[in-house]
Amino acid sequence: MIYYYLVFFITTIIAIGGDVKIKKISSIFIAIILILFAGTRLNVDNDYHMYYKLFQYMENTLEKFKNRDVPLEWSMYFFPYIFKIFNNTSDSIKACFALFAVLGVSTKIIAIKKYSEYFLLSITLYIGYLFLMMEMTTIRAGVAAGIFMLSLKNLEENNNKKFFIKLLCCFFFHSSSVLYIIPWILFKYKINIRLYYIAILISLFSTLLKINILTLFFLDRIFPKVQDYLKIMEWQKESGVNVLNFRVLFAVLIIIAGAVFYRKLKVIKYFEILFKIHIISLCFFLVFSNTSQVFSTRTFEMFAVMQILLYPLMIRIFPRKVRLIGWTIIILYSCVQIYYLIEVADIYKPYKSWLLN
């Protein structure tokens, strides 16, 4: 854990500086550090062995890949295929991990540099949670989420062509990217913010009533992969999702604060769209909380990547003289996130044994 905190503080220190040129140089250095950290790691996360075997035994023809029993995204075929240029299988696998790290980290760092008004705070938020989760575990979803971050301007400006090009790129890496069509629909038809608040209440209501949204709408019958996840959950006797976990409680506080100060904050560029995406993410978390941790947590995280840009904007709530309070809250939240991720959450125990050694 000390090792990761060292990386966290080094990259945070590098991120300090408001000058455009310094920010550009900082972005490059931070990206290099994080790419090396993620791209060269070994067996430290829950999904490492799964990806290792997929890269190692991926079908050698496109026809076999298309007809495999468990469908996979195209990136999982083309990346190992490209790196067949290496005679050594081990080198090819390492190259695949490195490429995912390059794409996952660089898309998010570019998006932070492009869209964030508070570069330092966005970097600390990214490294404090999503870096470990996305670039070290759910690497396909991590790249897709990074590309989605880059589409923020396209959503804001209703640039449908560029948005759907990015959406297709997301889908190349992870099939759950189809969920990104939902904010596009909502923003295209300019749904009033009040309906978002109603959606949160309905989602909370479905959680309290323990409604399984997947079986209610027969999604487990329509999508075989959904059915497989539910069977695994039943076989493993997976416990229910903790809807009062640290991240969700903080996300709820952000929604409350955003609602109270909505008129003040909506004049900030990108705030409104980021805030609405944040509400969407929590709605997904709640409605899927009675189904599986996989659906609930991962759908939440697919959208939660925008928290990197949204949360720093919330410091505008505070008067300028005491705005340091907002900075302190965000930085402390990032530090606590690392502790929670490694020390508390059982699903992240592989990190603990690695970081403590």
Image (cartoon, rainbow, N blue to C red):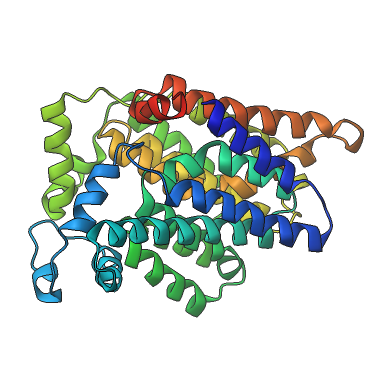
Image-quadrant location for residue 181 = bottom left
Q: Position of residue 138 (x, y in %)?
A: 36, 47
Residue at (36, 55) in percent of width and height: 97
Residue at (13, 68) in percent of width and height: 65
On screen, 280 above or below 338? below
On screen, 7 above or below 22? above
Q: Position of residue 299 (x, y in %)?
A: 37, 45
Residue at (66, 35) in percent of width and height: 9
Q: Is residue 178 visible?
A: no
* Closer-to-camera residue (15/87): 87
Q: Position of residue 149 (x, y in %)?
A: 54, 59
Residue lying farthest to the right in this orientation: 321
Q: Quadrant of the C terminus?
A: top left
* Closer-to-camera residue (76/29): 29
Image-quadrant location for residue 69 = bottom left
Residue lying farthest to the front in this orientation: 87
Residue at (23, 35) in percent of width and height: 212
Q: Position of residue 55 (x, y in %)?
A: 23, 58
Q: Is residue 336 visible?
A: yes
Residue lying farthest to the bottom in this orientation: 161
Residue 77 as seen in the image, left or right of residue 176: left
Residue 93 as seen in the image, left or right of residue 24: left
Q: How many marks?
A: 0
